[in-house]
Image: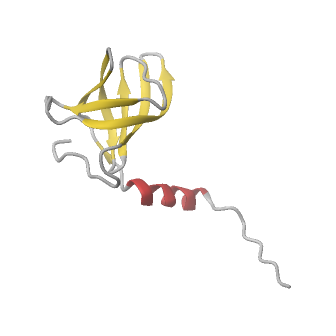
Amino acid sequence: MLVSRRSPPSSSEVHAQRRATGGARREATERVTLRGPDFETHGWTLNVSRGGVRAIVEEPLKSGLEYDIFFGDAEDAARKVTVVWVQDEADGQIVGVRFLDVVGSVPPENI
């Protein structure tokens, strides 16, 4: 019996797999507001993909919780997101959030 041994995927293969699920990232610097029950924080997008947003926010968010995200002044165009990861910084927090409204959805054109 022949046994095939496959080496672990390279970092570029893993990166390609991640890109395939969330789409290509594009840099963005749009003002964002994230709201939850009795909570609101403001920040800026760093990049956006079909699957979510990486942003820097003023007040800390909690990983695993859901929030409404608003881009720019579009108070009537909230999207549901969940916080996937957080990175604490001296002047705030960098967060990765995933869109919950539609799988493979595309971010609004204005960002």
Which of the colour schemes (rainbow, by chain, secondary structure, one colour) is used?
secondary structure
Q: Is residue 58 above or below residue 69?
A: above
Q: Is residue 83 above or below residue 110?
A: above
Q: Nearer the viewer, residue 29 or 59?
A: 59
Q: Is residue 25 above or below residue 69?
A: below
Instruction: Give how far across and how far down residue 67 sits, in percent.
Output: 34, 29
Q: Nearer the viewer, residue 28 or 42?
A: 42
Instruction: Give how far across and how far down residue 64 sits, in percent.
Output: 48, 32
Residue drawn at (37%, 56%) of the image = 23
How many numbered dots are placed on residues in this image?
Answer: 0
Q: Nearer the viewer, residue 12 or 23?
A: 23
Residue drawn at (52%, 55%) of the image = 15
Residue drawn at (50%, 28%) of the image = 87
Q: Quadrant of residue 46?
A: top left
- Which quarter of the image is occupied by the C terminus? top left
Residue drawn at (30%, 50%) of the image = 102
Instruction: Give how far across and how far down residue 13 sits, in percent.
Output: 56, 62
Instruction: Give how far across and how far down residue 41 sits, in percent.
Output: 31, 19
Residue 61 relative to residue 109: left or right: right
- Which quarter of the image is occupied by the N terminus? bottom right
Furthest residue toward front:
37
Furthest residue toward bottom:
1
